[in-house]
Image (tube, rainbow, N blue to C red):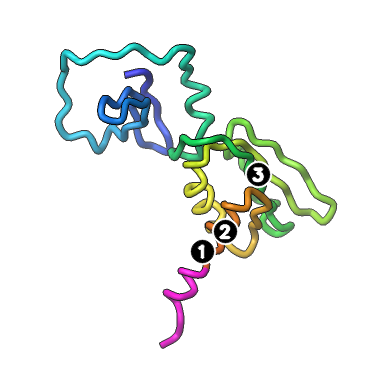
Amino acid sequence: MLHLHNFAGDWYAIAFDHQSQEVRDFHVGRMRQVHETEAFFTPPPGWQVDAHLRRGFFMTRGGRMTTVSLVFDAYQARWIRERQTFHVDEQREDLPDGSLRLAFPVGHNGLEAVARFCLTYAGHCRVEKPKSLRQLVRERLQQALKQHQEE
């Protein structure tokens, strides 16, 4: 194991996955049979916990890095400003109309988690970039509309 950390009340072990041959996050609560083995690994050269955690959003990480840019309208921005941070490397920019731009780097695999985050503020959060995230949010909204059609 490389690191043990808590996120939103859940414990995660960052360890080497012998099946995928990658460093992964494992939810400790999902572990059923933990036992010591003779399998060892050498941490990847230069591996650092902070760099690993920065590659994701919430607990989804990995993939090619991209920059996310979200704009919260003036209504929602007042509450977003009250929050500490959503991502350790985020940048905030107050816009003239009272809205707020939130930008941060994330691994491409984390875009699904960012889409869920955006949908939490549906109607008050607009994805500026990347285009793939905007499309993902659009697809989720269309799916939600379909599920809520009057019969």
Labelled pair 2, 1 in contact (Cβ < 8 Å) = yes
- Per the image, the residue denoted by label 3 is 82
Left-right relation of 99 to 1: right
The amino acid pointed to by label 1 is Glu
- Quarter holding the C terminus? bottom left
Which contiguous range is marked in magenta?
Answer: 142-151
The amino acid pointed to by label 3 is Glu
User: What residue is at 38 percent from the left and 20 percent from the top?
Assistant: 3
Q: Position of residue 114 (x, y in %)?
A: 53, 48
Q: Nearer the viewer, mark 3 or mark 1?
A: 1
- Per the image, the residue denoted by label 1 is 139
Q: Nearer the viewer, mark 2 or mark 3?
A: 2
Q: Position of residue 58 (x, y in %)?
A: 48, 40
The amino acid pointed to by label 2 is Gln
User: What residue is at 48 percent from the left and 13 percent from the top?
Assistant: 46
Labelled pair 3, 1 in contact (Cβ < 8 Å) = no
